[in-house]
Image: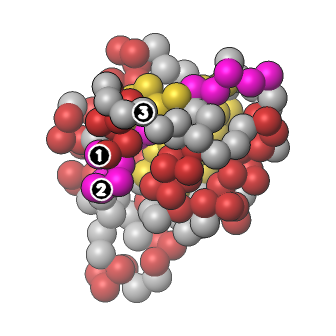
């Protein structure tokens, strides 16, 4: 069993106030949302074995708040990554629980690609919510009944949770 956490960075300053997109820091609201999500993860006892994070400032700051003290890798390809790039990193990962901290639209597309379609129930509602909006500091949790990350494919993940700051 593999568990995947797809986390969009928390609310960041506008690029007009900073200049360069990759250097946008979290806002006060973004830091508060990330702290609330960290508490939620702790309460659920969600702890990834490894974390891959975009090297952008806002993703690094989100990761520091949500996963303090975790061993984190910062592949440059995850900055504004496409679904295909995110999938390549997932499929080459080790461990049983992986967190990707990144950006939209890649994360939203990746969650939608991997999630199994259900006609009703919580997973269907989670998938609908993701399709409507994958807001800042939102987290999608998917579980896969596979032995290796390399075996994951379209529609094979059970979307067990979708959490946004408004739902906490």
In the rendered image, which quarter contains the C terminus?
top left
Quadrant in which residue 72 is drawn: top right
What residue is pinned by disc 3? 118
Residue at position x 55%, y 68% in the image: 80
Q: Is residue 59 above or below residue 148?
A: below
Label 3 vs label 1, nearer the camera: 3
Element type where label 2 sits in the image = loop
> Is disc 1 in contact with disc 2, using a CB cutoff of under 8 Å?
yes
Residue 141 falls within the magenta-colored stretch:
yes
Badge 1: how crowded within 10 Å, few (<14), some, or many (20+)?
A: some
In the rendered image, which quarter contains the N terminus?
top right
| Magenta part of the chain | 129-147
Looking at the image, tell me whether mark 2 or mark 3 is earlier in sequence order: 3
What residue is pinned by disc 2? 133
Element type where label 1 sits in the image = helix
Q: x and y percent of residue 63 in the render?
A: 49, 44
What residue is pinned by disc 1? 129
User: Marks 2/3: CA distance?
Assistant: 19 Å
């Amino acid at each position: 069993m593999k568990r995947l956490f797809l986390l969009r960075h928390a609310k960041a300053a506008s690029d007009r106030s900073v200049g360069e997109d990759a250097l946008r820091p979290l806002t006060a609201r973004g830091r508060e949302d990330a702290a609330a999500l960290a508490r939620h993860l702790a309460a659920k006892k969600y702890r990834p074995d490894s974390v891959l994070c975009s090297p952008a400032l806002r993703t690094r700051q989100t990761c520091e708040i949500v996963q303090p003290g975790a061993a984190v890798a910062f592949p440059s390809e995850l900055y504004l990554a496409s679904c295909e790039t995110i999938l390549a990193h997932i499929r080459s990962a080790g461990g049983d629980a992986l967190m990707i901290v990144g950006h939209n639209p890649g994360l939203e597309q990746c969650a939608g690609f991997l999630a199994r379609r259900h006609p009703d129930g919580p997973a269907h509602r989670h998938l609908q919510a993701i399709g409507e909006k994958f807001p800042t500091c939102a987290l999608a949790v998917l579980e896969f009944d596979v032995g290796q990350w390399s075996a994951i494919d379209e529609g094979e993940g059970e979307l067990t949770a979708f959490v946004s700051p408004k739902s906490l």
